[in-house]
Structure formats: structure tokens, C-alpha cells
Image (cartoon, rainbow, N blue to C red):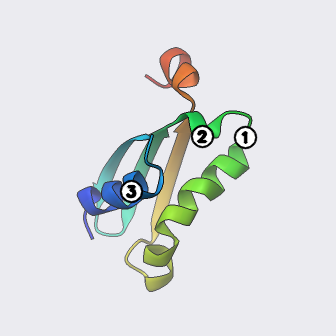
Amino acid sequence: MDAKTVEAMVSEALADATVSVDGAGANYDITVVSDVFADMRAVRRQQTVYATINQAIASGSIHAVNIRAFTPAEWESEGA
């Protein structure tokens, strides 16, 4: 699996999101910016992103991920 494939998986599931994926092999850093995260706590945001790649994690294609999830406003002030 490559970063572009992981990015496509997340983007397809979270249609309005801006997704960036870095990494290779089975380890990835995933950054997602979306309004869907409004009113969600950090754990719920990570669960939302994990759900989009769960099948790849279960199969072993993805071993480790670091997820950063922001609303657009948070991204403007904190993440960028």
C-alpha cells in the first residue's frame, strides 16, 4: 500500500475533507481537515478516520498511523 492509496480511502469516505498522507510501507501520518469534526472530541475524530482505513489495518496493509484531525478553523489557527 502507498500513501496515495491511503489518501484515496480516507477521501472517499470523508467526501468534504482535505486529506494529506505521508509515509510508506505500513506506517502513515494522516492529516484530515473537515467540518465533520465540529463538536467532536479528539478520540471520536480519530475513530472517524480509523473507520475509513479499518479494513486495511485488519488485513495488515497498514500497521501504524498517526492521525491529526482538524476543523477548517482549527487548521487555520493551529495546524497549518
Callout 1 touching callout 2 (CB < 8 Å) = yes
Callout 1 touching callout 3 (CB < 8 Å) = no
Determine the CA span between mark 1 and mark 3.
Answer: 20 Å
Q: Residue at x 44, y 84 (%)?
A: 59
Residue 12: numbered disc? 3
The extreme top residue here reads: 77
Q: Nearer the viewer, mark 1 or mark 2?
A: 2
Callout 3 touching callout 2 (CB < 8 Å) = no
Q: Position of residue 11 (x, y in %)?
A: 38, 51
Foreground: 41 or 35? 35
Residue 65: numbered disc? none
Q: Position of residue 36 (x, y in %)?
A: 60, 40
Callout 3 secondary element = helix
Q: Which residue is mark 2?
A: 36
Q: Amino acid at mark 3?
A: Glu
Callout 2 secondary element = helix
Q: Amino acid at mark 2?
A: Val
Q: Amino acid at mark 1?
A: Met
Q: Residue at x 48, y 77 (%)?
A: 55
Give above or below for 56 relative to 42: below
Circle 2: is it few (<14), some (14-19), or many (20+) Cα within 10 Å?
some
Q: Position of residue 30 (x, y in %)?
A: 43, 49
Between discs 1 and 3, the one toward the N terminus? 3
Circle 3: is it few (<14), some (14-19), or many (20+) Cα within 10 Å?
few
The extreme front residue here reads: 15
Q: Which residue is mark 1?
A: 40
Determine the CA span between mark 3 and mark 2.
Answer: 14 Å
The extreme bottom residue here reads: 59
